[in-house]
Image (cartoon, rainbow, N blue to C red):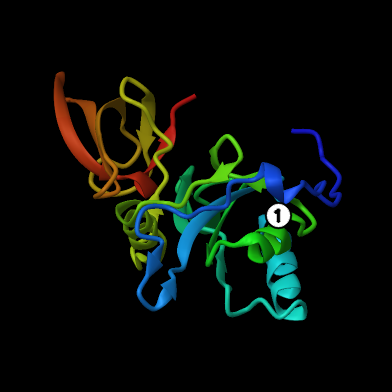
Amino acid sequence: MAEQHEHAAPTHEFDDIDIAGGEGAATEEGPRAEWFVIHSYSGMENKVKKNIEHRAESMGMTDRILEVVVPTETEIEIRNGVRREVERRVFPGYILVNMIMDEDSWYVVRNSPGVTGFVGMGNKPTPLRQDEVDKIMKRIESDAPRIKVSFQRGEHVRILSGPFAEFSGVVDDIFPDKGKARVLVSFFNRETPVEVDFIQLERDA
């Protein structure tokens, strides 16, 4: 993807922007903070996060712009028997902001360098539903890393270690949650299913 240069997002007249929150956004105690999603350039999420946090602090808006999150998760990649952990963005190009939506907070976030807009219908920023927030937070707060599946059913592989080391076979099924694959190997002229860890496999050239 071609590199895109950062520039300040254009401002808009507030009369053209519907900044009302979602259902139940206001309580007896006053407006309630909700989670909104903003667009940014892919690859610049962390920088944009810092831009928003800096503007919120410098403009005295930390009581209305409460938290900025770039959703990430740890993923295990296994290639040719080598296992490594990498941090990947769950939603490239998107950032979550927990904020009390009003004209001032909208202005601070929308005009932060690198922000290209709010996610919503028309000109109305749309807050996430609570079940959506819970699902995202559960995913990014999980201690268990996700395993990136590098193999496909029907793919020819070679077993690198274990009782069937150096045997070649065909991937019959994949179990991502277990980090394993079932491989059909030829053993005594019979196809035998063997369950093998991803780290024990490599593609057979």
**Residue for point 46% across, 68% down:** 33
Using residue 97 as the reference point, say whether residue 160 is left or right of it: left
| Quarter the N terminus occupies | top right
Using residue 146 as the reference point, say whether residue 179 is left or right of it: left
Q: From the image, tell me which residue sits under label 1.
A: 110
Q: Is residue 188 visible?
A: no
Query: Residue 32: x, y in percent?
Result: 43, 69
Image position of 27 with respect to 103: above or below: below
Residue 117: name its quadrant: top right
Image position of 130 with respect to 184: above or below: below
**Residue for point 80% across, 57% down:** 113
Query: Residue 46: x, y in percent?
Result: 67, 61
Could you say which is closer to the camera, residue 43 or residue 77? 43
At mark 1, the secondary structure is helix
**Residue for point 62% across, 79% down:** 62
Using residue 116 as the reference point, say whether residue 147 is left or right of it: left
Residue 141: name its quadrant: bottom left
